[in-house]
Amino acid sequence: MRTRMLLCAFLFLAGFAPAHAQFWEKKEYRQWSQADCKKMLEDSPWAHKFSVVEVRQDAFVEGATAQDSRAQVDYVARLQSALPVRQAVIRLAMIRNKYDKMTSEQKAQFDESAERFLAVNFDDRIVVQVDMSSTVISYTRQLSNFWASVREDAVPVNVLLIGTSGQRVIPARYAPPQGGSLQMEFTFPRRTAEGSLVEESNKPLMMEMPGLRMREITEPRVLFQFKAPKTKFQGQLAY
């Protein structure tokens, strides 16, 4: 009787997810909600948001609203080479394209394309995608113009990926914003002569890039941090 009770208790605990477990630990990616995907891409161990907020000098003119009084620039960096990030991209595509309503042939085509996307090998590189936005239209235009003006064959040397052991590397490749968008991509080598950029460590993987000096925005540096101990996915570091 005691053995049976212990067995039942073990089976109950084995199927019990800790209350603090994150959605990517509880559910297979095809079960993620749109909100789950948004969190993965914007606020997770693989995505970091950096915001600069300043009070506008013309904030107190007659008729100005509270929204008018704030000048804000937001940057979101995500580790696009990390598997859970790519899974979120696929899951969002499933939701937006109404995967459940597709025909069998359409699902097969989608699944084949998704598997190719998820199977890409990133053993030699780390890809960081950066989205930018601003509450001020002129700042949005300035951000887009500045980063679009950097040629693909011109490595932005003032952009750095800083490893958990302090290695500092510049991008091997840069993909500027296209068609007026505010999204760009940096590709860094995954390893240096000193070893891998990310090791089991309490120190974060960091990316540094220049900010823009605008009228109210005075932050000269944008810094993203990805905490290596938290970037484990399915038991392994994912980055």
Image: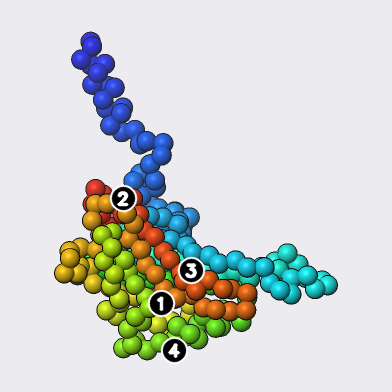
Q: Residue at x 37, y 89 (%)?
A: 151
Q: CA distance from mark 1 to mark 4?
A: 12 Å
Rendered image quadrant of residue 127? bottom left
Q: CA distance from mark 1 to mark 3?
A: 11 Å
Q: Residue furthest right?
A: 62
As drawn, the label of residue 75 is 3
Q: Secondary structure at mark 2?
A: loop
Tell me residue 205's x, y (percent). 32, 60
Q: Is residue 60 above or below residue 155?
A: above
Q: Amino acid at mark 4?
A: Ser
Taking depth in this image into account, of 164 and 135 the one nearest to the observer is 164
Label 2 to label 1: alpha-carbon separation: 28 Å
Where on the picture, by quarter, is residue 196? bottom left
In the picture of the structure, the residue carrying the numbered disc 4 is 149
Q: Who comes first in sequence, dot 3 or dot 4?
A: 3
**Front position among marks 2 and 1:** 2
Q: Which residue is mark 1?
A: 184
Mark 3 belongs to which amino acid? Tyr
Dot 1 or dot 4, earlier in sequence: 4
Label 4 Cα neighbours within 10 Å, binned few <14 / some 14-19 / many ≥20? few
Q: Which residue is mark 2?
A: 202
Badge 1 marks a residue whose secondary structure is strand
Going 48% across and 80% down the picture, which residue do you hit? Answer: 181
Mark 4 vs mark 2: which is more N-terminal? 4
